[in-house]
Image (spheres, rainbow, N blue to C red):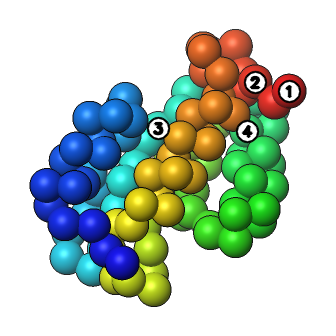
């Protein structure tokens, strides 16, 4: 089920640095992670891909030289669901305390 506007605002308050992106059926939550090197970025991307497969919920990702933007939305409900926020929290855990030194993968 898609979350309502007030529910989305409340959940955003609990997920630091995630923001709304897009509008209408393209509305999503998004966060950009920054890394020390391209290899750290790719390690993070692969870890997010593994997590997405485990969750059977797949984000859009834009990969740059030392950054990766992760964008969650639920196509089946044509909006943002609680599952998107659950996955956002899991991705934050992958990134560790400081994304500047690379993702924390273990």
Please determine whether, in this image, residue 78 is positioned above or below residue 4.
Answer: below
* Label 3–label 2 contact, CB within 8 A: no
Dot 2 crowding, Cα within 10 Å, few <14, some 14–19, many 20+:
some
14 or 51: nearer the viewer: 14
Q: Nearer the viewer, mark 2 or mark 4?
A: 2
Residue 44 placement (x, y as % from top left) = 73, 38
The label nearer to you, 4 versus 1, is: 1
Query: Is the residue marked by circle 3 packed among few (<14), some (14-19), or many (20+) residues within 10 Å?
Result: some
Residue labelled with disc 1: 106
Residue behind mark 3: 32
State the residue at coordinates (22%, 55%). 7
Q: Are marks 1 and 2 in contact (CB under 8 Å)?
A: yes
Q: Position of residue 72 (x, y in %)?
A: 47, 60
Name the residue: 70% across, 71% down. 56
Rounded to the nearest whole Å, what is the CA distance between mark 1 and mark 3?
A: 21 Å
Decide which of tag 1 and tag 3 comes sooner along the chain. 3
The local crowd at label 4, few if under 14, some if 14 to 19, many if 20 or more residues have their Cα within 10 Å, is many
Q: Nearer the viewer, residue 67 or 51?
A: 51
Residue position for label 2: 104
Tell me which label, 3 or 2, sits earlier in the chain. Answer: 3
Q: Nearer the viewer, mark 1 or mark 3?
A: 1
Local SS, label 4: helix
Q: Is residue 40 left or right of residue 36?
A: right
Residue reaching furthest left?
Answer: 6
Q: Secondary structure at mark 3?
A: strand
- Quarter that holds the N terminus: bottom left
Looking at the image, which is closer to me, 63 or 8? Answer: 8
Q: Quadrant of residue 5?
A: bottom left
Residue 91 seen from this side: yes
Q: In front: mark 3 or mark 2? A: 2
- Asked if residue 37 shows in the view, the reply is no
Left or right? Give the position of 3 relative to 9.
right
């Amino acid at each position: 089920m898609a979350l309502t506007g007030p529910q989305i605002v409340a959940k955003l308050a609990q997920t630091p640095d995630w923001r709304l992106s897009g509008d209408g059926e393209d509305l999503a939550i998004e966060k950009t992670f920054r890394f020390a090197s391209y290899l750290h970025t790719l390690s993070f991307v692969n870890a997010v891909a593994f997590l997405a497969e485990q969750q059977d919920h797949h984000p859009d990702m834009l990969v740059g030289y030392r950054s990766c933007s992760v964008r969650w939305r639920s196509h089946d409900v044509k909006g943002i669901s609680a599952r998107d926020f659950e996955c956002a929290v899991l991705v934050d855990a992958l990134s560790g305390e400081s994304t500047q030194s690379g993702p924390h993968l273990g």
